[in-house]
Amino acid sequence: MEIYGVHPRPPSLLQDTTERDIELIRVATKIKERGEPAIVLGDLNDVAWSPTTAMFMKTGGLLDPRRGRGFSTLTLHVGPGFVIHSITYSVRHILRSVQCACCRHSVPTIYL
């Protein structure tokens, strides 16, 4: 199994996403060419529903274990009787190749 840690430089206000997109496609192409079971972890500086992430996943033959499981919410327990529920729009990803199975998926409850 191969594990790829990916964190491309985020685009700036005066720069488009081309540099980030090229880096992601290079990683995806390497995964596809090697054909080994793979897991990609990291901050892609992109949301899961963007065309760039979709192209990255398609090129690399990757799956998102969050897909089909509804919204992921984070629950924060701040104190007695005070709970914050928030929907997270994460740019952090854990993607897997088809050879890897997702046995369990959960979002933690955090007590502050």
Image (cartoon, rainbow, N blue to C red):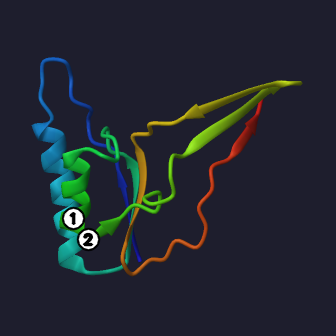
In the displayed orientation, state which residue is furthest to the right.
80
The correct choice, above or below, for 62 with respect to 36 in the image is above
Residue shown at 21% from the left, 52% from the top: 24
Q: Secondary structure at mark 2?
A: loop
Question: Mark number for residue 32?
Answer: none
Looking at the rendered structure, the number of numbered marks drawn on it comes to 2
Q: Amino acid at mark 1?
A: Lys
Residue shown at 21% from the left, 73% from the top: 32
Residue shown at 26% from the left, 35% from the top: 9
Question: Mark number for residue 61?
Answer: 2
Instruction: Please provide percent x and percent y for residue 83.
Output: 76, 27
Question: Dot 1: few (<14), some (14–19), or many (≥20) neighbours within 10 Å?
Answer: some
Using the rendered view, name the quadrant where residue 92 is placed.
top left
In screen coordinates, is 12 left or right of 73? left
Say which residue label 1 marks.
58
Q: Amino acid at mark 2?
A: Gly
Front in this rendered view, residue 56 or 72:
72
Give the quadrant of the C terminus. Answer: top right
Q: Secondary structure at mark 1?
A: helix
